[in-house]
Image (spheres, coloured by chain):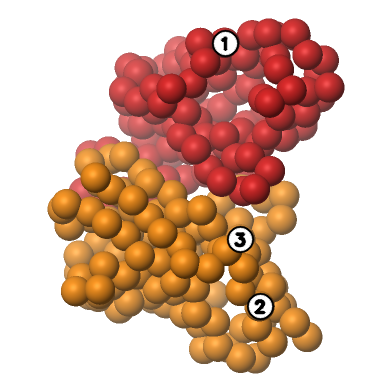
Chain colours: A orange, B red
Amino acid sequence: AQSVTQLDSHVSVSEGTPVLLRCNYSSSYSPSLFWYVQHPNKGLQLLLKYTSAATLVKGINGFEAEFKKSETSFHLTKPSAHMSDAAEYFCVVNNFNKFYFGSGTKLNVKP
Amino acid sequence: DTAVSQTPKYLVTQMGNDKSIKCEQNLGHDTMYWYKQDSKKFLKIMFSYNNKELIINETVPNRFSPKSPDKAHLNLHINSLELGDSAVYFCASSQTSLSYNEQFFGPGTRLTVL
């Protein structure tokens, strides 16, 4: 069975400080993993994806994520938060073309 | 050019009515999806079509009927609308022939049932 757990429903950081959004997955196989961002009243935009190449994946807007098979984790990080990063973030697992979404983490960025 | 487009963007209607949402993708993808996002932002897959054939149908009431006239279009028709159908509906597409394909999402249709 496949599932995705986003450990924090809300994360609040100050502008300029690091961001950490946590994601754990369970999968019987080697999955593809994605992070999507959804800004208010917008559709979902791909931030980055893991496709079994390098375990550290760089995405858009300075975000990156590290695939750790031993920990079944795919946490999303950014060294310095910007006000425009405030949004909902979704971790997604793809196994055999079926996508499993986490419940989302709302990132709040304080000035 | 918009990759995945949906119409309408907003839809307000009365209980009991029938409505349709249209989706089109110009990416040449062979698989399309419909998702429902509730007020808590949880995304639930409803349907998936591959080359016009239904491949995923996730315990959705049969008031919801997807139709795929060709692989670039996947429309969603909803009969006898209920209050609980109020949500944002997202269409997405992907290319299943690629090993590590991601989904591309449309902008969403906000459905409000009064």
Residue A107 in view (yes/no)? yes
Please check whether the numbered discs 1 and 3 fall on a single chain. Answer: no
- Residue B33, percent across and down? 45, 32
The amino acid pointed to by label 2 is: Ser
Residue A73 position (above or below residue B74): below
Q: Residue at x 83, y 22 (%)?
A: B114
- The nearer-to-camera label among 3 and 2 is 2
In the rendered image, which residue does mark 2 sit on?
A12
Circle 3: element type: strand
The amino acid pointed to by label 1 is: Arg
Q: Nearer the viewer, residue B3 or A95?
A: A95
Label 1 crowd bin: few (<14), some (14–19), many (20+), radius 10 Å: few
In the rendered image, which residue does mark 3 sit on?
A88
Marker disc for residue B63: 1
Tell which circle, 3 or 2, labels the residue nearer the N-terminal end: 2
Q: Residue at x 48, y 21 (%)?
A: B60
